[in-house]
Image (spheres, rainbow, N blue to C red):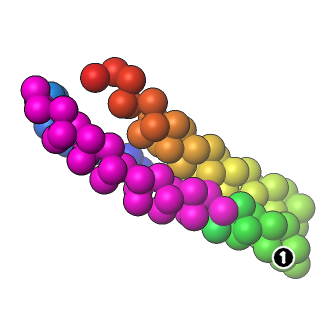
Amino acid sequence: MTNVVQLRPGVWPSDQSLVTTAARDATPLVGLLIGMIERVEGVGAQAALLDRPPLQIERIVQALLDAATALEQATDALLDGDDDR
């Protein structure tokens, strides 16, 4: 399964106040992503305690770790994106 996100062409405002406002808007997103990372890691710890075959536990935990890594990369990209402007 793949998810496709349609991106709009970059339009960079010449007014610095608009850029500052956009940077403030990223703050709640970063907070949400960090919260999601913590929840995914917590679920991974709970999944490790399930009464299931070890291979199944390993696959579940690995998938959750991959999800946490993807969320961390999204957070990094969101934070680093300000430098590209």
Tell me the quadrant of the picture where the C terminus can be found: top left
Front residue (pair 5, 15): 15
Q: Amino acid at mark 1?
A: Leu
Please report the residue visible at 45 percent of the width from the left and 30 percent of the height from the top: 80
Please report the residue visible at 84 percent of the width from the left and 76 percent of the height from the top: 50
Q: Position of residue 44 (x, y in %)?
A: 75, 64
Would you say residue 9 is visible in this rendering?
A: no
Q: Position of residue 12 (x, y in %)?
A: 15, 28
10 Å neighbourhood of mark 1: few (<14), some, or many (≥20)? Answer: few
Q: Position of residue 7 (x, y in %)?
A: 20, 38
Q: Residue furthest front?
A: 17
Q: Where is mark 1, residue-wise? A: 50
Main SS category, magenta section: helix
Front residue (pair 80, 1): 80
Please report the residue visible at 58 percent of the width from the left and 44 percent of the height from the top: 72
Q: Position of residue 49 (x, y in %)?
A: 87, 74
In this picture, which residue range is highlighted in magenta?
A: 13-38
Numbered marks: total: 1
* Residue 58 placement: quadrant: bottom right
Would you say residue 66 is visible in this rendering?
A: yes
Whether the magenta-drawn stretch holds residue 19 is answered as yes
In the depicted structure, whether residue 51 falls above or below residue 54: below
Instruction: State left or right for residue 68 relative to residue 73.
Output: right
Q: Residue furthest bottom?
A: 51
